[in-house]
Each structure stands twice: as structure tokens, then as C-alpha cells.
Amino acid sequence: MNADRRRILDMLADGRISAEEADRLIAALDRDAGPVTVLPAAKARAKYLRVAVETTDHRGVPSNVNVRVPMQVLRAGVRLAGVIPPQARDKVNAALRERGMDFDINQLKPENLDDLVDQLEELTVNVDQEATKVRVYCE
């Protein structure tokens, strides 16, 4: 396998190009139409939402929490939000408002899912306090 073909397959495996784009590039290689320019593709989609917490309690004992949530779980959660009965949604919204979060779960719709995940991929939250560090990001 030549280097161009390997590079195309690697980009496909990393999610940087679609299967159709890979097929088109490989077909161009097979036609031997001269050198094929492989343009840089869009950034690979994030696969995980990560939450990392490092803290020290009042006795000086360190604690670490490292949670890695697959984006597929988030996608499934958004789809499941659509089957929550309206009365339960109202209670969830009220509970969120009581805790200072003005968020309406009725707005979580499968047709908005890709936009939501795309926005989460750009998310980075860093909190650095005296005894606690919190980091939320996508990878």
C-alpha cells in the first residue's frame, strides 16, 4: 500500500473525511492521474465529554475524579428527552430554575442534536481555586 492510500485511510479512520471522500480520493489514485492533493479536512468530531476534578479536603487528602462520557450517550440522552411526559418535563424545568439554571428541556429535540453536540465540542471550562481544579472539555 502506498503512502497516499495509507494517508487517506488514516484520515477516514480518524473521522476527518467521510467514506465518500475517501472513495473519491482512492479512485483518483487508481486512475493514476498524477499526484493527488489531499486537502486538510475538517477537525475530527469529539468522541468524549471529559470532566476532571482534582481537590484536597480539609485534612489535606487529595481526591481525583475523572469522568469520560461518550458523546453517543449524550446523543441518546437527547433522544430520550423526547419521550419524557410533559408533566415530568415541567417538574424538571422547575427544579432547574430553582437551582439557578434557566434551561428548558423542551428545547432538546433530536433535530437540534447535531448543533448541540457541535457546540459541546467547542466547550472548555477551567476552574482553578485554592484546593480545587475542575476541567470540562471534549476530546
Image: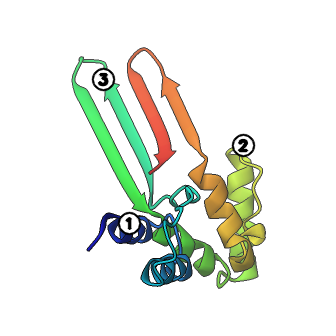
| Alpha-carbon span between mark 2 and mark 3 | 27 Å
Q: Earlier in the sequence, mark 3 or mark 1?
A: 1
Check whether the beta carbons of the residues at disc 3 and disc 1 lie within 8 A of each other: no
**Residue 4 badge:** 1
2 vs 3, front mark: 3
At which x and y percent is residue 41? 56, 59
The residue at 37%/64% (across/down) is 7
Q: In this figure, which residue is indicated by the disc labeled 2?
A: 100
- Which residue is more in the foreground, 23 or 68? 23
Classify 10 Å Cα crowding around label 1: few (below 14), some (14-19), many (20 and above).
Answer: some
In the image, taking residue 23 as reference, residue 82 lies left or right, namely right
Q: Is residue 91 left or right of residue 38?
A: right
Q: Amino acid at mark 2?
A: Gly
Pointer 2 or 3: first along the chain: 3
Mark 2 packing: few (<14 Cα in 10 Å), some, or many (20+)? few
Q: Horizontal and vertical percent for residue 64?
A: 28, 36
Whether residue 97 sits left or right of residue 50 in the image: it is: right
Specify the quadrant that holds the N terminus. Answer: bottom left
Tag 3 residue: 56
Report the residue that reaches farthest toward the top.
130
Q: Give the CA separation, mark 1 to mark 2.
A: 53 Å
Residue 116 in percent (x, y) is at: 67, 62
Identify the residue at image location x=45%, y=33%.
134
Q: Residue at x 73, y 78 (%)?
A: 111
Which three-letter amino acid code belongs to the residue tagged 3? Thr
